[in-house]
Image: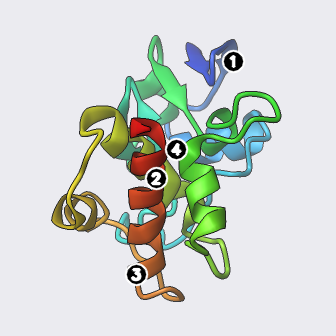
Amino acid sequence: MRIMLTVNGKEYVRDVEPRVLLVHFLRDELGLTGTHWGCDTSNCGVCVVRLDGVPVKSCTVLAVMADGHDVHTVEGLANGAELDPVQEGFVACHGLQCGFCTPGMMMTARWLLDEHPDPSEEDIRTALSGQLCRCTGYENIVRAIQWAAAKESS
C-alpha cells in the first residue's frame, strides 16, 4: 500500500506491506532508530511516539494507520543543536541510565508538558504509568520532567 505521512515535519511517501508496524517503518524504512522496539507485547512503552500530538505505542499501530497523519519521534525533539527542555532535564537530573526507555519517556514527557505545563508529581507518574524503566526507579525521571516544567515556566 502507498502511504504518505509527515514525520518530524518532513513528508514521506512510501510503499509498505499492510502488516508493517509503525515502529518498524520508522526504524527500518526511515532510519529513525531513536524509537526503540522492546517487549513485543505493548507493555514496556519504549516505542512511544506522538501521532497527531498524542503519545502512542508505535508497536500497536500499523504504518498504514499513520497514512495522512503527523508523527513525531525523539529525533524531532531538539531544534537543531538546541535541546528540548525535556532532553536537558534528563541530562541535568540524570533521568536515564541505560537509555533504552528514554526516548519513549521523553516523548510522553513532552506531551505532558504541552498539555499540562505545571504537572504535579502525581500527574507525571500517571502519564508515565504505561512505560517501564528497569534502571532508574523513576525518581530521576520525575525530577527531570519537573526540571523541564520549571525551565519552561521561567
Please state which amino acid type lies under the numbered disc 3: Glu
Q: What residue appears at the point 58 percent right and 63 percent down from the top-left corner?
A: 90
Marker disc for residue 14: 1
Question: Mark 4: few, some, or many residues within 10 Å (few <14, many ≥20)?
Answer: some
Of callouts 1 and 3, the N-terminal one: 1
Q: Give yes or no for contact between labels 4 and 1 (Cβ–Cβ under 8 Å).
A: no
Residue 91 lies in what quarter of the image? bottom right
Question: Mark 2: few, some, or many residues within 10 Å (few <14, many ≥20)?
Answer: many
Please state which amino acid type lies under the numbered disc 4: Leu
Q: Which residue is mark 2?
A: 59
79 and 72: which one is in front?
Answer: 79
Of callouts 4 and 1, the N-terminal one: 1
**Image position of 138 with respect to 126: above or below:** below
Q: What residue appears at the point 67 percent right and 80 percent down from the top-left corner?
A: 98
Of callouts 4 and 2, the N-terminal one: 4
Q: Secondary structure at mark 1?
A: strand
Image quadrant occupied by the N terminus: top right
Q: Give yes or no for contact between labels 2 and 3 (Cβ–Cβ under 8 Å).
A: no
Distance from disc 4 to disc 2, alpha carbons, whole Å, reads 6 Å
